[in-house]
Amino acid sequence: MEFTFYTEANAKVMRTLVRTARKTVRKKEDRFTHIFGIAVIVLALLLVIPLDGRPFVLNTSAVITLIAAAVVAIVMVFQDRMNGYIARKRLMPGAANNTAVFHEDSFTSSCEVGTTEWHYDKVLVVAETNDYFVFLYSKMHGQVYEKASMTGGTTDEFRTFIEEKTGKKVQKI
């Protein structure tokens, strides 16, 4: 059985890749980052809000503190979009359009730059979203495969195939 995917590394694909990494292999770091971000926001609010009954005064110090808290909140909310944008900018020229062919013993990934052969035992995490299958090789490296472009079988057949070949359960994200 042979499955083929064509994926273009657009903003949505890269956002899916970093989101999947954040929810799987980077889960511990993500939890720490969120706790730290919330602590910074709470601390900023405690510094600005008068707790002793005095009236609230909007001075330069309060404005700067509130802006800092707002920036932290914005970064926390849009972190996947920002990290996806950065990851897309860091792609090697010619690596944005990828064709992957899955064979019985290995799979190949081809783009303008070249072709790479991968072995299933190198896959750390296999994840699935509504639109993509995501393979993570480490905290910093992964590939995304668009379901809509798949040929050679159904998504259920591919899911079963990849679970058998990697020995890993596909995680639903």
Image (cartoon, rainbow, N blue to C red):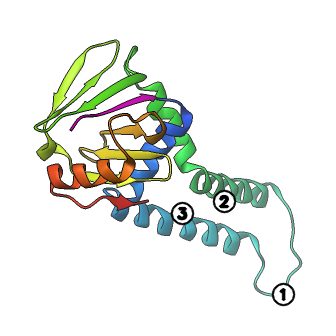
Residues at marks 1 and 2, CA–CA distance in whole angstroms: 23 Å
157 is within the stretch colored magenta? no
Identify the disc placed on residue 53. 1
Q: Amino acid at mark 3?
A: Gly
Q: Secondary structure at mark 3?
A: helix
Circles 2, 3 touching at the beta carbon (< 8 Å): no
Q: Look at the image and give the residue range highlighted in magenta.
A: 1-8
| Secondary structure mainly formed by the magenta segment | strand
Q: Amino acid at mark 1?
A: Gly
Q: Residues within 10 Å of mark 1 (few under 14, many from 20)?
A: few
Does residue 44 appear to the left or right of 145 in the view shown? right
Q: Which residue is mark 2?
A: 69
Residue drawn at (34%, 41%) of the image: 153
Q: Amino acid at mark 2?
A: Ala
Q: What label does residue 123 carry, if any?
A: none
First along the sequence among labels 2 and 3 = 3
In the rendered image, which residue does mark 3 sit on?
Answer: 37
Q: Position of residue 82 (x, y in %)?
A: 55, 41
Using the image as rendered, state which of residue 148 and residue 121 is in the foreground.
Answer: 148
